[in-house]
Image (cartoon, helix red, strand yellow):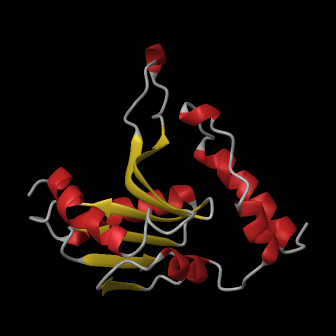
C-alpha cells in the first residue's frame, strides 16, 4: 500500500476506533500545514511544512502523527514526527506505518511501540497531568477562523495558548 492507502485503510479507522473525531471535542486535522515555506528570492516560497495528522481535543493541539506506507518501517517517520512536534511545541508525537505505532514523549524522551493510540481523554490527561478548571474553560473558546478560510499561524496560536496557560496556573 502507498502512504495515502495506508492512511485511509489502516490509520484513519484506528484513530476513529480510539475515539478521535468521534468523541465530542476531538478532531483529527489531516495534512495540517504548519508553515507556508520560507520566502525565497523573487517572493516565491520554499517547501511547506505539512504534518500528516494533528490530534486536537478541547480546542488544543495535543499530538502529531507522521504516517508512512505500510511497506516501510515506522522508524522512517520518527525524525519528521519529532521535527513537527518541536515546531508545534507538543509533548507527544507518533510515527506509524499503519501496522505499528511508535510513540515518542518529547518531554521525557521515552520512546516505545504501542498497540493503539490513546483516546482523546487519555492523551489530554497525559499532556495535562495536573488538571485545571480554567484551562478547560479557556480551551472551550475557539480561535476565530473566518469560516475556515483563515487560521492563526502556529506561533501565534502557541503564544495565545501559553499566555492562557500561565493565567490558568496563576503564573503571570
Is any part of residue 107 visible from this angle? no
Foreground of the two, 160 or 19:
19
Is any part of residue 21 visible from this angle? yes
**Number of marks drawn:** 0
For the N terminus, the quadrant is bottom left
Q: Is residue 117 above or below residue 140?
A: below
For the C terminus, the quadrant is bottom right
Foreground of the two, 4 or 155:
4
- Which quadrant would residue 68 be assigned to in this image? bottom left
Drawn side of residue 169 relative to residue 126, left or right: right
Q: Residue at x 23, y 70 (%)?
A: 74
Drawn side of residue 109 relative to residue 96, left or right: right
Q: Residue at x 22, y 56 (%)?
A: 8
Q: Where is residue 149 drawn, in percent x and y?
A: 55, 30
Q: Is residue 104 above or below residue 15?
A: below
Q: Where is residue 117 drawn, in percent x and y?
A: 37, 77
Q: Is residue 50 above or below residue 104?
A: above
Q: Residue at x 29, y 71 (%)?
A: 14
Q: Where is residue 126 drawn, in percent x and y?
A: 56, 82
Q: Where is residue 70 drawn, in percent x and y?
A: 13, 65
Q: Is residue 52 above or below residue 129?
A: above
- Which quadrant would residue 134 be assigned to in this image? bottom right
- Which quadrant would residue 72 be assigned to in this image? bottom left
Amino acid at each position: 500500500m502507498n502512504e495515502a492507502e495506508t492512511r485511509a485503510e489502516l490509520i484513519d479507522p484506528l484513530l476513529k476506533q480510539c475515539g478521535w473525531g468521534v468523541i465530542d471535542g476531538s478532531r483529527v486535522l489531516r495534512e495540517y500545514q504548519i508553515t507556508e515555506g520560507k520566502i525565497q528570492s523573487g517572493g516565491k516560497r520554499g517547501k511547506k511544512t505539512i504534518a500528516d495528522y494533528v490530534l486536537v481535543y478541547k480546542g488544543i493541539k495535543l499530538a502529531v502523527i507522521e504516517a508512512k506506507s505500510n511497506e516501510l518501517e515506522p522508524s522512517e517517520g520518527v525524525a519528521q514526527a519529532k521535527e513537527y512536534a518541536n515546531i508545534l511545541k507538543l509533548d507527544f508525537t507518533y510515527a506509524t506505518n499503519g501496522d505499528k505505532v511508535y510513540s515518542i514523549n518529547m518531554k521525557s524522551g521515552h520512546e516505545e511501540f504501542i498497540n493503539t493510540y490513546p483516546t482523546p481523554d487519555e492523551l489530554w490527561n497525559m499532556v495535562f497531568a495536573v488538571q485545571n478548571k480554567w484551562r478547560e474553560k479557556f480551551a472551550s473558546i475557539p480561535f476565530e477562523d473566518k469560516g475556515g478560510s483563515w487560521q492563526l499561524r502556529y506561533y501565534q496560536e502557541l503564544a495565545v495558548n501559553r499566555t492562557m496557560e500561565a493565567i490558568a496556573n496563576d503564573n503571570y
